[in-house]
Amino acid sequence: MEIKQGIPIQLELSVIRKEYITPHYIRVFLTGNGVEQFICTTVGAHNKIFIPPKGIDKVYFPKLNTDTKQWITPPEEVRPVIRTYTHRGIDIDKKEIWIDFVAHGDEGPASEWAINAQKGSVLGVSMKAKKKKLQQDAENYVLIGDATAIPVLGSILENLPKTAKGTCIIEVHSKEDEQHLQTKADIHIQWLHNSQPQKESRLPEVVKNLILPENNRYVFIAAEFSAVKEIRHYLRNEKKWQRQEFSAVSYWKSGFSEDQSVLERQEDRNNNF
């Protein structure tokens, strides 16, 4: 199947099965017509998920007015909640993709949906048909993230060459939430345990105590807004890392929904890169 690069792929998918891969991490397997189109995307890259309201078994996607270039939103009673996620894997032969969700009760619509999802539950998934590289080429890597970043960190680790070396620091709820992440590279994975990440992350403290590589290096940071901001400030201003040596993205902001914090997170990233 030939799909034009950059064209949005927008599909209504249904749950085949789900599994708790750790006490606070749910993997949901999805299928549906057109799943094979996702072969044109990058596992580990962002997507948008569309969560239908309770009692609605169909996904009503926003539609683009091609004349005005404005999005037309569905009526409020059927309007889905939109969140940014990452598809963790794809199996074209089985017509499946899977998405991992951090299970933190009913605090957020995506977590609540994943916890309550059953076989046949529907979810909208949208991505641009585009291949992209998740990280820059380097010899030395520092990968930093919290539980929300495990899908992208796992994808990066799987694709690093065996000549790469470095450190990967991941903050999760507890020892039971550590995962087995595969890599051919010489990467030391360090797990931090924090049962209340919404209060304060341990990531900045640990990063500041690292012996960092001096050259041919690249750091990837994905975590809560305040933690990302503190780590980036430390690397840029105290350790004098250059812009091209890292990527930093905040996936969420403590105390705020994605809708409430998206503009601040985007503005902060744009002002610092």
Image (cartoon, grey):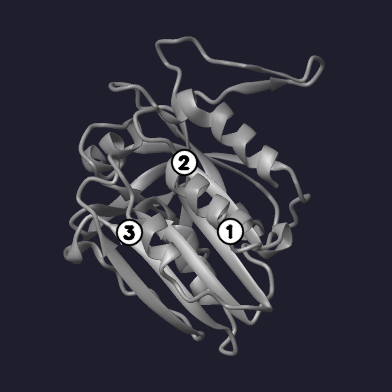
Q: Is residue 224 left or right of residue 218?
A: left
**In the drawing, what numbered circle is on residue 109?**
none
| Residue at 63% over, 65% down | 135
In front: label 1 or label 2: 1
Does residue 45 appear in the picture of this structure? Answer: yes
Q: Nearer the viewer, residue 44 or 211?
A: 211
Location of mark 2 (residue): 225
Left or right? Give the position of 30 relative to 235: left
Q: Nearer the viewer, residue 215 or 258?
A: 215
Is the residue under label 3 in contact with that under label 2 (CB below 8 Å)?
no
Query: Disc 1 marks which residue?
Result: 238
Q: What element carries label 1?
A: helix
Up-down: is 199 above or below 201? Answer: above
Q: What quarter of the picture does the N terminus occupy? A: bottom right
Name the residue rendered at 43%, 47% in the picture. Answer: 227
Q: Position of residue 6 (x, y in %)?
A: 75, 46
Q: Position of residue 182 (x, y in %)?
A: 41, 78
Amino acid found under the numbered disc labelled 2: Phe
Which quadrant would residue 113 be assigned to in this image?
A: top left
Residue 93, visible in the rendered structure: no
